[in-house]
Amino acid sequence: MMKDLIDLFLTFAKIGGFTFGGGYAMLPILQREVVEKKGWATEDELMDYYAIGQCTPGIIAVNTATFIGYRKKGILGGIVATLGCVFPSVIIISIIAAFINNFADIPWVQNVLSGIRVCVCILIFNSVVKLGKKALIDTTTWILFAIVFSLSLFTGISNILLIVAAGVAGIIIRGNKEDVKK
């Protein structure tokens, strides 16, 4: 039991410690560690965790860590995975906060941060492509994607409302397709 909890903590600490850019930037690392290396979830399950993590308050990667930890070792596993995920950030932020005013105006520090931002964009884009390959499987899902993408880009509709509406649309559309098959 303790070995499993330590493994959860260290895995999510590694994910949290080597990811810059927030929850979405963690997605490729979560996928590699949780699905490919550890086998704690399938790609479909991880996509479900992402979706649920997006709908619940908090950071998507932390929510996903909580779900996976809970699935593996119950409430204690959820707590340990969550702590593992946030622990490196707390340490790093504490160190940065202590020294940021001394270094923020140095040109090479600004250049490093600019480079990191570019890398984070690529990590997020790669996550979108991977998720898209799994989620956009037929004409219906492409149409739903186009509608939700357009609404999120050109309106002020809440992301949460869009997610809920897309979920309802999925139930209605898939339900009708299953009814037709019967």
Image (spheres, grey):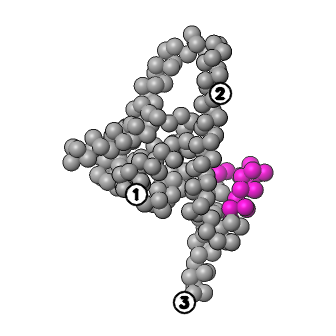
Identity of the residue drawn at 61% across and 36% down: 119
Q: Name the amino acid type tagged 3.
A: Lys
Q: Residues within 10 Å of mark 2 (few under 14, many from 20)?
A: few
Q: Is residue 105 above or below residue 49?
A: above
Q: Which is more N-terminal, label 1 or label 3?
A: 1
CB-based contact (under 8 Å), mark 3 and mark 1: no
Q: Name the amino acid type tagged 1.
A: Ala
Quarter in which the C terminus is drawn: bottom right
Say whether residue 20 is visible. Answer: yes
Q: Position of residue 16 (x, y in %)?
A: 44, 37
Q: Which is more N-terminal, label 2 or label 1?
A: 1
Q: Write down the residue under mark 3.
A: 182
Q: Name the amino acid type tagged 2.
A: Ser
Identity of the residue drawn at 44% across and 28% down: 90
Q: Position of residue 101 (x, y in %)?
A: 58, 12
Left/right of residue 125 with respect to residue 150 in the rendered view: left
Query: Which secondary structure lies at badge 1?
Result: loop
**Foreground pick, 128 / 56:** 128
Q: Write down the residue under mark 2.
A: 114
CB-based contact (under 8 Å), mark 2 and mark 3: no
Q: Write down the residue under mark 1.
A: 41
Query: Which secondary structure lies at badge 2?
Result: helix
Q: Position of residue 71 (x, y in %)?
A: 35, 55
Identity of the residue drawn at 60% across and 31% down: 116
Q: Which residues are magenta?
A: 144-160
